Image (cartoon, grey):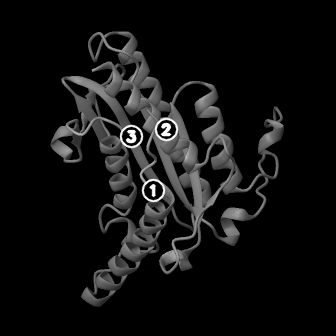
């Protein structure tokens, strides 16, 4: 059976438009109330700006044979056991007949503080995956095949995220791929390495400018880390699980 990508490109553009629109509305409401958060925080604290991508994942799960799978989005049902900590809260879990089919994280970064946020996102992504796979090895999810573990990042396409960044390392050289790499490029490198080290089934990054609120335009940085790879691998995993039933 051919996999179904659920018209992902059109839905992704709608998700991008919703992302920027939700941020704008959140900022507007907080300013009108006189309780606006500083800087970009007003848009972040408004809620689930990545919900359009969550909806896309749901469509892919249903379109590829797991129509009756449990797709958990409520906070109370999103925790998984960890190995280095008791539990970890995920953004979306797909369960089917007591088996963990997929665990996904949806992240975003909007300027101006790209530097600190990139480092925090990197440490979080690595730690989360390492904790999950160590728990899996130790039987945290029972006896089952490996789940799909996905990480999707939307980063603002802006001069500060596209400009070369210099690093200081007084004792040893940084790896050459990071030299003068912009933050958009660094996210692309991060996603590639997360997959090469088998920390995530797929890690993807897309870049989108603020004015995409009207168009939904976004850019993939490479085939390996692109959104099409993300949805294709997820659809294939879901179809495989459905065939196993």
Numbered label attached to residue 125: 2
Left or right of residue 66, residue 190 in this image = right
Cα distance, mark 2 to mark 1? 28 Å
Residue for badge 1: 7
- Element on which disc 1 rests: loop
Picture layout, residue 79 above or below residue 187: above
Residue at position x 38%, y 32% in the image: 238
Q: Quadrant of the C terminus?
A: top left
Picture layout, residue 76 above or below residue 198: below
Residue at position x 47%, y 24% in the image: 130
Camera-nearest label, 1 or 3: 1
Picture layout, residue 142 above or below residue 92: above
Residue 138 sits in which quadrant?
Answer: top left
Q: Which is nearer the N-term, disc 2 or disc 1? A: 1
Q: Which is nearer the N-term, disc 2 or disc 3? A: 3
Picture layout, residue 183 above or below residue 162: above
Residue 140 sits in which quadrant?
Answer: top left
Pick the front one: 222 or 129:
222
């Amino acid at each position: 059976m051919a996999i179904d990508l659920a018209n992902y490109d059109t839905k992704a553009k709608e998700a991008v438009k919703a992302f920027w629109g939700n941020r704008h509305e959140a900022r507007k409401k907080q300013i009108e109330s006189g309780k606006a958060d500083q800087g970009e925080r007003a848009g972040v604290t408004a809620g689930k700006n990545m919900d359009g991508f969550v909806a896309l994942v749901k469509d892919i799960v249903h379109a590829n044979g797991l129509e009756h799978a449990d797709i958990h989005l409520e906070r109370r049902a999103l925790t998984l056991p960890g190995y280095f900590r008791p539990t970890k809260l995920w953004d979306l879990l797909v369960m089917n007949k007591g088996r963990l089919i997929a665990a996904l994280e949806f992240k975003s970064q909007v300027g101006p503080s790209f530097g600190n946020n990139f480092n925090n996102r990197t440490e979080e992504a690595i730690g989360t995956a390492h904790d999950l796979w160590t728990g899996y090895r130790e039987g945290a999810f029972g006896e089952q095949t490996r789940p799909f573990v996905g990480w999707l990042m939307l980063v603002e396409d802006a001069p500060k995220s596209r400009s070369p960044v210099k690093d200081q390392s007084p004792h040893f050289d940084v790896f050459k791929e990071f030299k003068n790499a912009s933050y958009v490029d660094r996210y692309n490198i991060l996603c590639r390495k997360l997959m090469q080290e088998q920390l995530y089934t797929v890690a993807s990054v897309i870049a989108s400018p603020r004015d995409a609120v009207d168009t939904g335009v976004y850019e993939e940085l490479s085939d390996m880390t692109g959104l099409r790879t993300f949805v294709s691998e997820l659809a294939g995993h879901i179809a495989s699980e459905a065939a196993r039933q």
